[in-house]
Image (cartoon, rainbow, N blue to C red):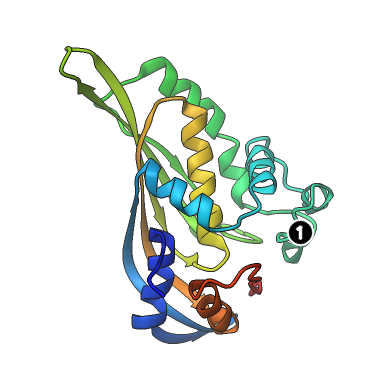
Amino acid sequence: MKPTNKYYQVLADILDNGRTQTNKKGSIKYLTNQVLHLTPADLLDIFETHSIARKKLRTELQMFEAGITATEQYRAEGITWWDYCGEQLVNSYPTYFRKFPALVEKIRKEMRESKNYVLFLGETGAKTSQQPCLSLVQFQIESTTDSNGQTTGSLIVSAYQRSSDASLGLPSDIYHLYLMAREIGIPLKSITLFLANVHIYESNLLNTFRLLNGEKDIKFVLNV
């Protein structure tokens, strides 16, 4: 079956062209240095086609921004995928995302087209229960002038991921980046992800085939 959106194209490319590797979590099929460029229309295609836990992901991002590290509090909101990290998310997403609201205010105040606004995630060599797979998010403002001479700004989001679980993590990261762009409040032009290593775990290969063949309610296994 031909992939119906750009995210599914990534899944299909891994299945068709990926190499096999074994790590401490098991065997994966992977590709390196992939680029996923998404316009608002592409995002709509993904969100309409692919089922993700939008409410939970929205709540998760809000909790990240609030700096909440207790996995029990995430569990109370139905967010159970951090349970394996123990009682606390150490040097993980909340450590870095709590800086995002201040960055949003800075962008809104300055609105400088000549400046790149960057949120760094994940320090190297620090104690961690789960180092963020999303390593850097950059926001740029681009001005355009229409035929009537009216100038408007649009937002370009670029993100670097050191590692991406294509079955579970990637659609969640795409949705988080979309929510972050909405917080800034500037019309979105594009989101581009640079995926250093994007992979599907062996335990999820069959269900990925089933997903791309149009089956509904497909569930994937979290590999930890």
Q: Is residue 24 above or below residue 42?
A: below
Residue 24 visible in the shown view: no
Q: Which residue is drawn at 50% across and 32% down?
A: 182
The answer to whether 25 is drawn above or below residue 140 in the figure is below
| Residue 83 picture quarter | bottom right
Q: Is residue 96 above or below residue 35?
A: above
On the question of residue 190 being in view, the answer is yes
- Residue in the foreground of this view, choosing between 185 and 215: 215
The residue that mark 1 highlights is: 80
Q: Which residue lies furthest to the top in this view?
A: 149
Disc 1 residue crowd, few under 14, some 14–19, many 20+, Cα 10 Å: some
Pick the quarter of the image with the C terminus.
bottom right
Occupied quadrant, residue 63? top right
Please provide percent x and percent y for residue 157: 37, 40
Residue 34 lies, in percent from the top left, at 32, 65
Residue at 36% from the left image edge and 82% from the top image edge? 16
Badge count = 1
Question: In the visual, does 208 lie left or right of 112?
Answer: right
Dot 1 amino acid type: Thr
Image quadrant in which the N terminus is located: bottom left
Q: Which secondary structure lies at badge 1?
A: loop
